[in-house]
Amino acid sequence: MTERKPMLSAAEALDFLLAAVEPIAQTQTLPTLEANGRVLAVAQTSQLNVPPMDNTQMDGYAVRAADCAGGNARLAVSQRIPAGHVGQALQPGTAARIFTGAMIPPGADAVVMQEQCELEKTAEGDIVTIRHAPKTGEWIRRTGEDIRAGSIILAAGTRLRAQELGLAASVGLAHLPVVRKPRVAVFFTGDELAMPGEPLKPGAIYNSNRFTLRGLLENLGCEITDYGIVPDSLQATRDTLRRAAADHDLIITSGGVSVGEEDYIKPAVEAEGRLNMWQIAIKPGKPLAFGQIDRTGQDGCAYFIGLPGNPVSSFVTFLLFVRPFILRLQGVADVAPRAFNLRADFAWAKADRRNEFLRAKINEQGGLDLFPNQGSAVLTSTVWGSGLIDNPPGQTIAQGDTVRFLPFSELLY
């Protein structure tokens, strides 16, 4: 009798998946305004200093600090400098009215905010009384204080968010080189599946996974080909795998990865390619499959990930394994979500020999409440919850214990 190999742990399975990824090599150049959510292909260097000149952080008066020693200095207002204009050299014993972002005139070495000044209009001109003795450099943004010319501002593999786009724009980058979008094919197995809008026949269920997985893939910036619901047959499954492998980087399926007589994913993948991983020691989501599908008449192959059919199992395994896989496929180096140590405001005595991922919500006291039904088909738990508790194998949880929490905000994008 062949000895049964132990299932991989969640960490081992993720390491295996990430080690197998060869990042996409093709790139394209996009206008910076259109690069949101894409992954940077080449590190970007600033060609200028930010700010490009010394400028004021406040509305007020540019002065020589030595002229204001002791406070209550009366200075003639010699000029007015709005943002975007260049002032004249500041003469000793004078002040320049200046506005936020404007260039500091030569000779000035401090700015006094207008709230600390009193303006008096006289026949000879404006006089300002400075009620504050400023230090040299006060309220001045120095040249290159934020970014120095020649420095790398964005590393290759950076996933571009609004703030990265703003940073690129701040140094004048109108276009950015990005990795081509991953091409992902999806299909769903099960003769029991129906689409919303169709009448439910006896024994049928609506295909919620189609909507969940497509939404998750869209969040990751994928080009998606949806082959819909594939009949429960070996030939239909093989045919769809073969078609999908031709021009996609990754094929994702939902359902059919168990060991029942009507589960055809495993034999279909083995017939069209290779199955490298089968089942992992987590709950929910034990039947997770990974392999490659050969491209008929072409070199190379498409990656394959088979997700469970139960809605929560499919959702959780996507977040834990497919999301980091797709990010690494795009060249993102750090794919690990941030985890937080939070207080459990509940007790959990149902310890399992597998690594459990429990749906929980952060409460007003900063602790965690547990959804009462942790079943793998209870999709309401994913809407109610704000994340997953990563509970180790065999671990019970007493009220007040500290647990490892993965917020959905770290897992959905």
Image (cartoon, rainbow, N blue to C red):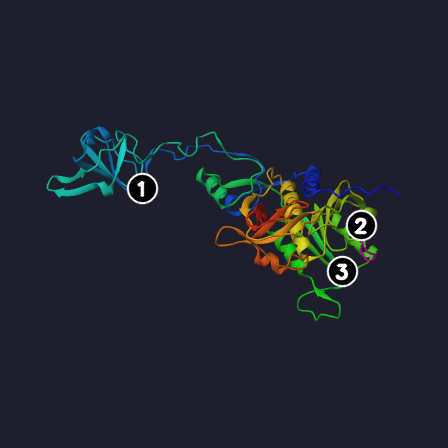
**Amino acid identity at mark 1:** Thr
Q: Is residue 263 magenta?
A: yes
Q: Main secondary structure of the magenta part?
A: loop
Residue beneath disc 1? 100
For residue 266, which numbered disc appears in the image?
2
Instruction: Report helix, strand or loop for mark 1.
Output: loop
Instruction: Compare residues 383 and 364 and report the one nearer the observer.
Output: 364
Pick the quarter of the image with the N terminus: top right
Nearer to us: label 1 or label 2: 2
Residue beneath disc 3? 190
Earlier residue among tags 1 and 3: 1
**Amino acid identity at mark 3:** Gly
Query: With respect to residue 346, does 300 lie above or below?
Result: above
Highlighted magenta segment, given as a residue range: 260-266
**Amino acid identity at mark 2:** Lys
For label 1, the crowd category at 10 Å Cα-Cα, with few meaning under 14, some 14 to 19 and many 20 or more, is some
Percent position (x, y) of residue 389?
60, 49
> Left of 1 or right of it: where is 322?
left
Nearer to us: label 1 or label 3: 3
